[in-house]
Amino acid sequence: MTLCLTVNAQEKRYIAGISYGFQYKITDIWVGDPYNIWIDQTSSSIVEGFVYRRLSDLFQAGLYCDYEWGKFDVIGLPEQTAERLGLGTLWLGHYPDKWIQFQLGGYVGYNRVFVDYEDVDDRSGMDYGIVVGPAVEYRNFGIAIHHHAGFAWYPKDANPDEFTYNNTKFKVKLYYIF
């Protein structure tokens, strides 16, 4: 029992870090009734904090909190601003268990969007998708470049009645293993 406790106490099981990323310009935002239009989002910036726990040598899961700010274009109107705050869970598998590795996983989160546009209400919804990209680790430090591809859905409980979009993000993640 002492040997088991000693080995597990020395094993590095946690990962904590920050990331900065962006979502490039997309045309896949649907705004429902009463507008029923597709709008363009210009590129936006994203800051994220995260913590994982290693569940095995090749798999980890954890929590994240991110904040995004950006602008969008509505036909015939000046550029508008929006902000998003998200909380969720993220899981990653990596292979091989070496200093350079390939990571693949997914995420599910809860978002709150704050829109600065006439009578459009702020709203809450969910965000889910996949994460893929390379990572390099040296001693207790790591850096990863991840591509997040997902879908965000905001239910019909506000004005306008529907708001959905496909989102594609790129993030550079710096992390510490302890």
Image: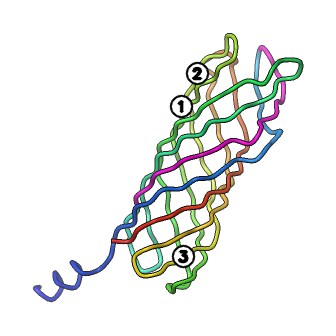
Q: Quadrant of residue 178?
A: bottom left
Task: Mark 3 or mark 2: name the one nearer the start of the chain.
Answer: 3
44 with respect to 66 (left or right): right
Residue 145, given in percent of the width and then of the height, sits at 62, 66
120 with respect to 126 (left or right): right
For residue 112, which numbered disc appears in the image? 1
Q: Quadrant of residue 120?
A: top right
Q: Which residue is mark 3?
A: 94
Q: CA distance from mark 1 to mark 3?
A: 30 Å
Looking at this view, is 172 or 87 the one in front?
A: 172
Q: Which residue is mark 2?
A: 122
Question: Quadrant of the image for the N terminus?
Answer: bottom left
Q: Secondary structure at mark 3?
A: strand
Q: Cβ–Cβ below 8 Å for labels 3 and 2?
A: no
Residue 25, given in percent of the width and then of the height, sits at 79, 43
Residue 74, given in percent of the width and then of the height, sits at 82, 24
Task: Mark 1 or mark 3: name the one nearer the start of the chain.
Answer: 3
Amino acid type at image mark 1: Arg
Residue positioned 64% across, 66% down in the render: 132
Neighbours of disc 2 within 10 Å: few (<14), some (14-19), many (20+): some
Amino acid type at image mark 2: Asp
Q: Is residue 4 above or below residue 166?
A: below
Q: Secondary structure at mark 1?
A: strand
Q: Secondary structure at mark 2?
A: loop
Protein image colouring: rainbow
Q: Cβ–Cβ below 8 Å for labels 2 and 1?
A: yes
Task: Mark 2 or mark 1: name the one nearer the start of the chain.
Answer: 1
Amino acid type at image mark 3: His
Q: CA distance from mark 2 to mark 1?
A: 7 Å
Residues rendered magenta in the picture: 34-51
Q: Cβ–Cβ below 8 Å for labels 1 and 3?
A: no
172 with respect to 6 (left or right): right
